[in-house]
Image (cartoon, grey):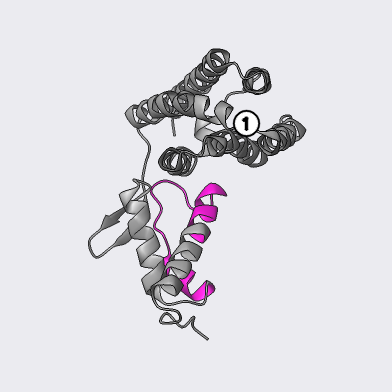
């Protein structure tokens, strides 16, 4: 039985679109959908037990975010990556995250400290996990916890979309194909500086961390290109 799209009017339609978006998002994150592949939105609508409308609306939102592209009479496809987009995405992170740190520290009350402690400890628990996806999830949650402490709503929303752009548009294996030995140490520096209410040290630690993962991403991307050029059939 299909979801009644007119139930509670626009709120119901938004809920269905959000559900469809999250399902597509999980498929991309788990590599069920890879760059260049067509999104099977009709089959997805059947699986989610809803009409095509919310699925297409979710894909149009993803098109706006640069995650998919639409080809007339062919459907929606996962977009390919380019080195310039990797650079721009990390440049935005470099601007945004350090900018909101003073607000996060200003709002760091006892409850906020507990949230930060929990996010940091959960990251540490999986920092040596063989599962790349688990490490990425906890890394994102750690950074988003810092952002949410700032209570800067637009910045939080922008950063959340930026993480989606980075980790959905660019496959995790592509960006993180090289080891990140310094990631845990970087996170510890950020955590300790924020807990000490040291704005400058927190900003410096964040910038260092983002620079490290950007350089890792670029080198991993270049290694993948070099390997593909060496393949001879």
Asked if 50 appears above or below 153 in the picture, the reply is below
Asked if 190 appears above or below 159 in the picture, the reply is above
Boundaries of the magenta span? 23-47
Residue drawn at point x = 22 percent, y = 61 percent: 72
Secondary structure found at label 1? loop
Q: Is residue 27 magenta?
A: yes
Q: Is residue 31 magenta?
A: yes
Outermost residue, bottom side = 1
Q: Residues within 10 Å of mark 1 (few under 14, many from 20)?
A: many
Residue 126 x %, y %: 73, 35
Residue drawn at point x = 52 percent, y = 60 percent: 23
Residue 61 x %, y %: 35, 56
Q: Is residue 177 visible?
A: no
Question: Quarter of the image holding residue 169?
Answer: top left
Between 175 and 224, the one nearer to me in the picture: 175
Residue labelled with disc 1: 108
Q: Horizontal placement of 138 versus 24: left or right?
A: right
Q: Is residue 154 visible?
A: yes
Q: Horizontal placement of 25 versus 197: left or right?
A: left
Outermost residue, right side = 125
Q: If the image is split into quadrants, where does the C terminus sit?
A: top left
Q: Horizontal placement of 126 versus 156: left or right?
A: right
Residue drawn at point x = 55 percent, y = 30 percent: 104
Between 143 and 34, the one nearer to me in the picture: 143
């Amino acid at each position: 039985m299909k979801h009644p799209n007119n139930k509670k009017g626009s709120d119901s339609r938004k809920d269905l679109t959000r559900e469809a978006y999250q399902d597509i998002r999980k498929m991309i994150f788990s590599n069920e959908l890879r760059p260049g592949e067509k999104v099977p939105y009709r089959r997805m609508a059947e699986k989610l037990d809803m009409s095509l409308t919310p699925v297409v609306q979710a894909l149009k939102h993803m098109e706006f975010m640069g995650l998919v592209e639409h080809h007339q009479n062919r459907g929606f496809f996962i977009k390919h990556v380019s080195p310039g987009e990797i650079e721009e995405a990390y440049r935005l992170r470099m601007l945004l995250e350090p900018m909101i740190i003073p607000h996060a520290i200003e709002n760091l009350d006892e409850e906020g400290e507990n949230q930060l402690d929990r996010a940091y400890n959960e990251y540490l628990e999986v920092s040596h996990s063989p599962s790349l996806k688990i490490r990425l999830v906890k890394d994102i949650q750690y950074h988003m916890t810092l952002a949410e402490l700032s209570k800067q709503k637009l910045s939080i929303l922008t950063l959340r979309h930026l993480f989606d752009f980075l980790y959905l548009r660019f496959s995790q294996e592509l960006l993180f194909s090289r080891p990140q030995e310094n990631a845990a140490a970087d996170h510890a520096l950020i955590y300790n500086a924020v807990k000490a209410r040291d704005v400058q040290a927190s900003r410096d630690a964040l910038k260092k961390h983002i620079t490290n993962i950007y350089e890792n991403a670029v080198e991993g991307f270049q290694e993948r290109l070099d390997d593909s050029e060496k393949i001879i059939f």
